[in-house]
Amino acid sequence: MKITLTGSLGHISRPLAIELVQKGHNVTVISSKAERQNEIEAIGAKAVIGTMADAGFLTEAFKGADVVYVMETHGAGSFFDQELDLMAAISKIGHNYKRAIEQSGVKRVVHLSSIGAHTDKGNGMLAFHHDVESTLKQLPDDVSIKFMRPVGFYYNMLAFIPTIKSQGAIISNYGGDDKEPWVSPVDIAAVIAEEIEKPFNGREIRYIASDEVSPNEVAGILGEAIDKPDLKWLVIPDEQLLNSLVGVGMNPQVAKGFVEMNASRRGGVLYEDYYRNKPTLSKTKLRDFAKDFAVAYNKA
Protein backbone atom coordinates (compact mmCIF):
# COMPACT_ATOMS: atom_id res chain seq x y z
CA MET A 1 0.00 0.00 0.00
CA LYS A 2 0.92 3.62 -0.41
CA ILE A 3 0.94 5.15 3.07
CA THR A 4 1.62 8.77 3.99
CA LEU A 5 2.66 9.62 7.54
CA THR A 6 2.74 12.95 9.32
CA GLY A 7 4.92 13.46 12.39
CA SER A 8 8.34 13.41 10.69
CA LEU A 9 10.62 10.99 12.58
CA GLY A 10 9.15 11.55 16.02
CA HIS A 11 8.70 9.11 18.89
CA ILE A 12 5.86 7.31 17.09
CA SER A 13 6.36 8.09 13.40
CA ARG A 14 9.94 6.77 13.26
CA PRO A 15 9.21 3.22 14.50
CA LEU A 16 5.95 3.27 12.52
CA ALA A 17 7.71 4.19 9.27
CA ILE A 18 10.42 1.59 9.84
CA GLU A 19 7.89 -1.19 10.49
CA LEU A 20 5.75 -0.28 7.47
CA VAL A 21 8.79 -0.14 5.17
CA GLN A 22 9.95 -3.51 6.48
CA LYS A 23 6.51 -4.92 5.67
CA GLY A 24 6.93 -3.83 2.05
CA HIS A 25 4.72 -0.75 1.98
CA ASN A 26 5.46 2.38 -0.05
CA VAL A 27 5.87 4.94 2.73
CA THR A 28 5.99 8.73 2.47
CA VAL A 29 6.96 10.74 5.56
CA ILE A 30 6.02 14.41 5.89
CA SER A 31 8.49 16.59 7.78
CA SER A 32 8.77 20.32 8.26
CA LYS A 33 12.57 20.05 8.44
CA ALA A 34 14.54 19.69 5.20
CA GLU A 35 17.51 18.35 7.18
CA ARG A 36 15.45 15.24 7.98
CA GLN A 37 15.22 14.21 4.31
CA ASN A 38 18.36 12.07 4.23
CA GLU A 39 17.43 10.38 7.50
CA ILE A 40 13.95 9.58 6.20
CA GLU A 41 15.31 8.20 2.95
CA ALA A 42 17.86 6.12 4.87
CA ILE A 43 15.05 4.02 6.39
CA GLY A 44 13.58 3.41 2.94
CA ALA A 45 10.80 6.00 2.93
CA LYS A 46 10.17 9.01 0.71
CA ALA A 47 10.50 12.43 2.32
CA VAL A 48 8.13 15.30 1.58
CA ILE A 49 9.03 18.62 3.17
CA GLY A 50 6.29 21.00 4.25
CA THR A 51 4.08 22.02 7.14
CA MET A 52 0.76 20.86 8.54
CA ALA A 53 -0.20 24.54 8.70
CA ASP A 54 -0.46 24.50 4.86
CA ALA A 55 -3.63 22.71 3.72
CA GLY A 56 -2.63 22.97 0.06
CA PHE A 57 0.68 21.26 0.72
CA LEU A 58 -1.06 18.51 2.71
CA THR A 59 -3.53 17.95 -0.12
CA GLU A 60 -0.73 17.32 -2.60
CA ALA A 61 1.15 15.13 -0.12
CA PHE A 62 -1.94 12.99 0.52
CA LYS A 63 -2.88 12.45 -3.14
CA GLY A 64 -2.56 8.84 -4.26
CA ALA A 65 -2.24 7.45 -0.73
CA ASP A 66 -4.21 4.37 0.23
CA VAL A 67 -3.95 5.36 3.92
CA VAL A 68 -2.85 8.55 5.66
CA TYR A 69 -1.76 8.78 9.29
CA VAL A 70 -2.35 12.20 10.83
CA MET A 71 -1.33 13.66 14.16
CA GLU A 72 -1.20 17.14 15.66
CA THR A 73 1.78 18.75 17.31
CA HIS A 74 3.16 22.18 17.90
CA GLY A 75 6.95 22.55 17.92
CA ALA A 76 9.34 22.03 20.79
CA GLY A 77 9.19 24.85 23.29
CA SER A 78 5.74 25.98 22.21
CA PHE A 79 4.37 25.51 25.74
CA PHE A 80 6.54 28.47 26.74
CA ASP A 81 5.44 30.70 23.85
CA GLN A 82 3.50 33.47 25.58
CA GLU A 83 1.71 34.45 22.36
CA LEU A 84 0.47 30.98 21.42
CA ASP A 85 -3.21 30.08 21.57
CA LEU A 86 -2.62 26.33 21.63
CA MET A 87 -6.27 25.34 21.30
CA ALA A 88 -6.75 27.55 18.24
CA ALA A 89 -3.48 26.40 16.67
CA ILE A 90 -4.34 22.71 17.01
CA SER A 91 -7.89 23.34 15.80
CA LYS A 92 -6.48 24.93 12.64
CA ILE A 93 -4.33 21.87 11.99
CA GLY A 94 -7.40 19.65 12.36
CA HIS A 95 -9.31 21.72 9.81
CA ASN A 96 -6.32 21.59 7.45
CA TYR A 97 -6.34 17.81 7.67
CA LYS A 98 -10.06 17.69 6.96
CA ARG A 99 -9.68 19.88 3.88
CA ALA A 100 -6.66 17.95 2.62
CA ILE A 101 -8.37 14.58 3.08
CA GLU A 102 -11.47 15.79 1.23
CA GLN A 103 -9.56 17.36 -1.65
CA SER A 104 -7.01 14.57 -2.06
CA GLY A 105 -9.63 11.83 -2.25
CA VAL A 106 -8.15 9.72 0.56
CA LYS A 107 -10.69 7.25 1.94
CA ARG A 108 -8.78 5.62 4.82
CA VAL A 109 -7.39 7.67 7.70
CA VAL A 110 -5.66 6.78 10.96
CA HIS A 111 -5.74 9.66 13.43
CA LEU A 112 -3.53 9.87 16.51
CA SER A 113 -5.87 11.21 19.16
CA SER A 114 -5.60 10.72 22.92
CA ILE A 115 -7.24 9.51 26.06
CA GLY A 116 -9.66 12.23 27.12
CA ALA A 117 -10.88 12.82 23.57
CA HIS A 118 -14.29 11.37 24.44
CA THR A 119 -15.31 14.70 26.02
CA ASP A 120 -14.75 18.43 25.70
CA LYS A 121 -15.20 19.10 29.42
CA GLY A 122 -13.16 18.43 32.53
CA ASN A 123 -10.09 17.13 30.68
CA GLY A 124 -7.97 20.28 30.49
CA MET A 125 -5.66 20.60 27.52
CA LEU A 126 -6.81 17.23 26.16
CA ALA A 127 -9.98 18.96 24.96
CA PHE A 128 -8.20 19.82 21.72
CA HIS A 129 -8.18 16.12 20.83
CA HIS A 130 -11.96 16.04 21.17
CA ASP A 131 -12.10 19.13 18.96
CA VAL A 132 -10.01 17.56 16.19
CA GLU A 133 -11.89 14.25 16.35
CA SER A 134 -15.13 16.21 15.96
CA THR A 135 -13.72 18.05 12.95
CA LEU A 136 -12.62 14.83 11.24
CA LYS A 137 -15.99 13.22 11.93
CA GLN A 138 -17.48 15.88 9.63
CA LEU A 139 -15.79 14.19 6.66
CA PRO A 140 -18.09 12.32 4.24
CA ASP A 141 -19.29 8.92 5.37
CA ASP A 142 -17.22 7.15 2.72
CA VAL A 143 -14.05 8.25 4.53
CA SER A 144 -13.22 5.62 7.14
CA ILE A 145 -11.32 6.83 10.19
CA LYS A 146 -9.58 4.94 12.97
CA PHE A 147 -9.15 7.13 16.05
CA MET A 148 -6.18 5.92 18.08
CA ARG A 149 -6.39 6.99 21.73
CA PRO A 150 -3.14 6.29 23.57
CA VAL A 151 -2.88 7.03 27.29
CA GLY A 152 -0.07 9.01 28.97
CA PHE A 153 3.32 8.50 27.32
CA TYR A 154 6.14 7.08 29.43
CA TYR A 155 8.53 9.76 28.21
CA ASN A 156 6.34 12.43 29.83
CA MET A 157 7.82 11.12 33.08
CA LEU A 158 11.12 12.73 32.10
CA ALA A 159 9.52 15.97 33.29
CA PHE A 160 9.85 14.57 36.83
CA ILE A 161 13.64 14.80 36.71
CA PRO A 162 14.04 18.49 37.71
CA THR A 163 12.10 18.18 40.98
CA ILE A 164 13.73 14.85 41.79
CA LYS A 165 17.10 16.57 41.37
CA SER A 166 16.15 19.75 43.25
CA GLN A 167 13.67 18.54 45.86
CA GLY A 168 14.18 14.79 46.02
CA ALA A 169 10.62 13.96 45.02
CA ILE A 170 8.12 13.67 42.17
CA ILE A 171 5.66 16.54 42.66
CA SER A 172 2.25 16.92 41.02
CA ASN A 173 -1.36 17.80 41.80
CA TYR A 174 -2.49 14.18 41.76
CA GLY A 175 -1.03 10.96 43.17
CA GLY A 176 -1.86 8.03 45.42
CA ASP A 177 -2.45 4.33 44.99
CA ASP A 178 -5.06 4.22 42.21
CA LYS A 179 -3.60 2.59 39.13
CA GLU A 180 -3.56 4.51 35.86
CA PRO A 181 -2.46 3.46 32.36
CA TRP A 182 0.77 4.47 30.62
CA VAL A 183 2.09 3.65 27.16
CA SER A 184 5.29 3.35 25.15
CA PRO A 185 5.44 5.19 21.80
CA VAL A 186 6.93 2.03 20.30
CA ASP A 187 3.81 0.12 21.34
CA ILE A 188 1.63 2.86 19.85
CA ALA A 189 3.50 2.53 16.55
CA ALA A 190 3.01 -1.24 16.56
CA VAL A 191 -0.75 -0.91 17.12
CA ILE A 192 -1.07 1.72 14.38
CA ALA A 193 0.87 -0.48 11.94
CA GLU A 194 -1.51 -3.33 12.80
CA GLU A 195 -4.58 -1.14 12.27
CA ILE A 196 -3.30 0.18 8.93
CA GLU A 197 -3.24 -3.38 7.57
CA LYS A 198 -6.66 -4.35 8.96
CA PRO A 199 -9.94 -3.55 7.19
CA PHE A 200 -11.41 -0.07 7.67
CA ASN A 201 -15.07 0.19 8.55
CA GLY A 202 -16.62 3.59 9.20
CA ARG A 203 -15.48 5.34 12.37
CA GLU A 204 -13.62 3.24 14.93
CA ILE A 205 -11.87 3.96 18.24
CA ARG A 206 -9.03 2.01 19.85
CA TYR A 207 -7.31 2.80 23.12
CA ILE A 208 -3.62 1.92 23.48
CA ALA A 209 -1.82 1.20 26.76
CA SER A 210 1.26 -0.72 27.87
CA ASP A 211 1.02 -0.90 31.67
CA GLU A 212 -1.16 0.16 34.59
CA VAL A 213 0.60 1.46 37.70
CA SER A 214 -0.24 3.90 40.48
CA PRO A 215 1.70 7.12 41.07
CA ASN A 216 3.21 5.63 44.22
CA GLU A 217 4.29 2.57 42.24
CA VAL A 218 5.81 4.87 39.60
CA ALA A 219 7.89 6.54 42.31
CA GLY A 220 9.04 3.16 43.59
CA ILE A 221 10.02 1.79 40.18
CA LEU A 222 11.76 4.96 39.00
CA GLY A 223 13.41 5.43 42.39
CA GLU A 224 14.82 1.92 42.23
CA ALA A 225 16.16 2.57 38.72
CA ILE A 226 18.02 5.75 39.78
CA ASP A 227 19.23 4.32 43.09
CA LYS A 228 16.81 6.38 45.18
CA PRO A 229 14.68 3.63 46.75
CA ASP A 230 12.94 6.10 49.07
CA LEU A 231 11.72 8.35 46.23
CA LYS A 232 8.23 9.67 47.02
CA TRP A 233 5.41 11.10 44.91
CA LEU A 234 4.15 14.24 46.66
CA VAL A 235 0.77 15.83 45.96
CA ILE A 236 0.35 19.62 46.01
CA PRO A 237 -2.76 21.79 45.44
CA ASP A 238 -3.79 22.73 41.91
CA GLU A 239 -3.10 26.41 42.50
CA GLN A 240 0.41 25.74 43.76
CA LEU A 241 1.28 23.72 40.67
CA LEU A 242 -0.26 26.34 38.38
CA ASN A 243 1.73 29.13 40.00
CA SER A 244 4.89 27.06 39.74
CA LEU A 245 4.43 26.38 36.03
CA VAL A 246 3.61 29.99 35.21
CA GLY A 247 6.54 31.04 37.37
CA VAL A 248 9.01 29.12 35.20
CA GLY A 249 7.62 30.74 32.07
CA MET A 250 4.94 28.36 30.82
CA ASN A 251 2.17 29.91 28.73
CA PRO A 252 -0.69 30.52 31.25
CA GLN A 253 -3.30 28.90 28.98
CA VAL A 254 -1.15 25.79 28.61
CA ALA A 255 -0.31 25.71 32.33
CA LYS A 256 -4.00 25.91 33.24
CA GLY A 257 -4.84 23.14 30.78
CA PHE A 258 -2.04 20.96 32.14
CA VAL A 259 -3.17 21.38 35.74
CA GLU A 260 -6.80 20.64 34.78
CA MET A 261 -5.71 17.55 32.85
CA ASN A 262 -3.85 16.22 35.89
CA ALA A 263 -6.80 17.04 38.14
CA SER A 264 -9.03 14.90 35.91
CA ARG A 265 -6.87 11.92 36.82
CA ARG A 266 -8.00 12.16 40.43
CA GLY A 267 -10.79 9.68 41.01
CA GLY A 268 -10.35 8.27 37.52
CA VAL A 269 -12.53 10.81 35.68
CA LEU A 270 -10.08 10.92 32.78
CA TYR A 271 -10.17 7.14 32.43
CA GLU A 272 -13.89 6.42 32.49
CA ASP A 273 -14.20 5.78 28.75
CA TYR A 274 -10.86 3.94 28.68
CA TYR A 275 -12.12 1.40 31.20
CA ARG A 276 -15.37 1.01 29.26
CA ASN A 277 -13.26 0.11 26.20
CA LYS A 278 -10.18 -1.29 27.88
CA PRO A 279 -7.53 -2.61 25.46
CA THR A 280 -5.19 -5.54 25.83
CA LEU A 281 -2.00 -4.13 27.34
CA SER A 282 1.00 -3.98 25.01
CA LYS A 283 4.42 -5.40 25.81
CA THR A 284 6.58 -2.50 27.04
CA LYS A 285 6.23 -2.19 30.82
CA LEU A 286 7.20 0.65 33.12
CA ARG A 287 10.21 -1.30 34.37
CA ASP A 288 11.47 -1.40 30.76
CA PHE A 289 11.13 2.37 30.44
CA ALA A 290 12.74 2.90 33.85
CA LYS A 291 16.08 1.91 32.31
CA ASP A 292 15.79 4.77 29.80
CA PHE A 293 14.63 7.09 32.56
CA ALA A 294 17.75 6.28 34.57
CA VAL A 295 19.99 7.09 31.60
CA ALA A 296 18.26 10.45 31.11
CA TYR A 297 18.36 11.18 34.85
CA ASN A 298 22.08 10.51 35.08
CA LYS A 299 22.76 12.75 32.08
CA ALA A 300 20.67 15.64 33.43
Image (cartoon, grey):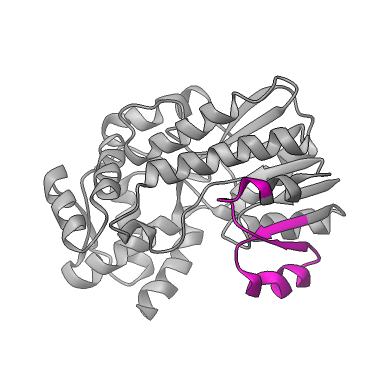
Tell me if residue 62 comes above or below residue 41 in the rendering: above
Residue 169, image quadrant? bottom left
Stretch in magenta: 28-56
Tell me if residue 10 comes above or below residue 62 in the rendering: below
| Residue 88 image offset from top left, x and y in percent | 41, 41
Horizontally, residue 169 falls left or right of residue 292, namely: left
**Is the C terminus in the top left, top right, bottom left or bottom right quadrant?**
bottom left
Tell me if residue 207 comes above or below residue 186 in the rendering: above
Residue 233, image quadrant? bottom left
| Magenta run includes residue 50 | yes
Q: Is residue 278 visible?
A: no
Horizontally, residue 144 falls left or right of residue 174, namely: right
| Magenta run includes residue 96 | no
Q: Residue at x 16, y 60 (%)?
A: 247
Horizontally, residue 242 falls left or right of residue 86, namely: left
| Residue 220 image offset from top left, x and y in percent | 31, 57
Q: Nearer the viewer, residue 64 or 198?
A: 64
Q: Residue at x 20, y 64 (%)?
A: 248
Q: Residue at x 46, y 54 (%)?
A: 74
The residue at the far bottom in this view is 299
